[in-house]
Amino acid sequence: MESIVVNVNTKSEGKLIKDIASKMGYSSFLLNDVEKRMIARIKLSQLTVKESSAPDISLDEIQQEINHVRAARYAKKTKKKGSR
C-alpha cells in the first residue's frame, strides 16, 4: 500500500480533498499540527535508533585516522615548499 500526503492551507481545502478521495474509493484522514509533530518525532526516534546501532569506533582508530590525514597534509605542504 502506498500513501500520499497533501498539505493544505485551510480546513475547507482539507475537507474537499478528503471528500474527493472518499468519492474515488480511497480511505483518507486529516492530521492536525500536533499529530504531524508526533509522527515526525517517531520518525526521528527511529532514525536515532538506527544510528545508535552503528559499530563503535575506538579512540585508537580515531587517532590513527587523524594521524593519517595530518601526514597526508604535511606531505602536500612539504612538496609545495620543495617545488618553490
Image: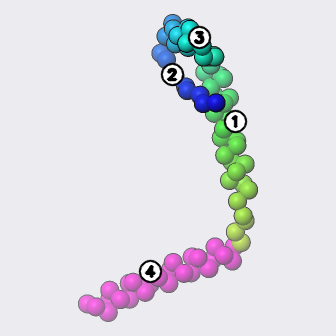
Q: Tell which tag, 3 or 2, sits nearer the viewer.
A: 3
Task: Name the residue type under label 2.
Answer: Asn
The tag earlier along the polypeptide, 1 or 4, is: 1
Q: Nearer the viewer, residue 4 or 70?
A: 4
Taking the magenta stretch, the answer to whether it contains residue 83 is: yes
Which residue occupies 70% across, 69% down? 57
Residue furthest bottom in the image: 82
Q: Note whether residue 17 is visible.
A: yes
Question: Which image quarter: residue 60?
Answer: bottom right
Say whether residue 11 is visible: no
- Report crowding for label 4: few under 14, some 14 to 19, many 20 or more residues within 10 A (C-alpha): few
Query: Mark 4 is on which residue type?
Result: Arg
Question: Disc number at residue 56?
Answer: none
Disc 1 residue type? Ile
**Tag 4 residue:** 73
Residue position for label 1: 42
Number of numbered markers: 4
Q: Residue at x 73, y 56 (%)?
A: 53
Magenta extent: 59-84
Q: Secondary structure at mark 4?
A: helix
Q: Which residue is mark 3?
A: 22
Which of the colour schemes (rainbow, by chain, secondary structure, one colour) is used? rainbow
Please name the residue that numbered disc 2 is placed on.
7
